[in-house]
Amino acid sequence: MLNEWGVFNIKRVVPVHIQLTTTMEQDGQRDQYHFDEQGQFVELNGKYYLHYQEHQGGTATPVQFRLGTDHLHLRRSGIRETDFEFQLSAPTKTRYRTEYGIIGMLVTTNRLAVEFDPQDVNGSIDLEYQLTANEQLIGTYQVQLQFAA
């Protein structure tokens, strides 16, 4: 990630408005969360990222998406840390860090549509995935995200 002079090669950072709806189904219960946040679209070393903070219950959680046309990477920081790789071709393994320890999980991506225009700086993510641990379904999740400069 460092260039020949030992620094990051950030090509561009553009402020964006992000609208996000997350639907979670766990243990027969369904919850939905809406976020309307300000963030940044970043072009770094030929890759594209969305950075923003989710504000909920007085807590700000840093979130980063690395955008790709056939895959998506999500990292959330804070007390609970997630580092998920989404791809339709095969489930991916991950670790979920909680205040009680680390839980190994499997991420199965059921739907993934990432569209973005790096020139006009806008796009959308349509994602549905399942998390399992020890071959037990933890939940099914849907993410609908739109962003624009």
Image (cartoon, rainbow, N blue to C red):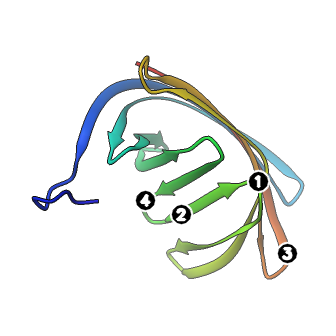
Q: Is residue 85 above or below residue 29?
A: below
- In terms of sequence position, does the residue under pointer 1 or pointer 4 come before the other? 4
Q: Secondary structure at mark 1?
A: loop
User: From mark 4 to mark 3, how far is it between C-alphas?
Assistant: 25 Å
Query: Which is more foreground, mark 3 or mark 1?
Result: 1
Residue where numbered disc 4 is placed: 77
Q: Quadrant of the N terminus?
A: bottom left
If you read the primary sequence from the N terminus, does the residue marked by circle 3 or circle 1 appear first?
A: 1
Q: Residue flagged by tag 3: what amino acid is it?
A: Gln
Give the secondary structure at mark 2. Answer: strand
Measured as percent of width and height from the top left, residue 115 is found at 61, 30
Label number found at residue 83: 2
Residue 75 against residue 113 in the figure, above or below: below
Residue located at (70% from left, 55% from top) = 87
Inter-mark Cα distance, 4 to 2: 9 Å
In the rendered structure, the answer to whether residue 94 lies left or right of residue 18 reads right
Q: Residue at x 40, y 18 (%)?
A: 149
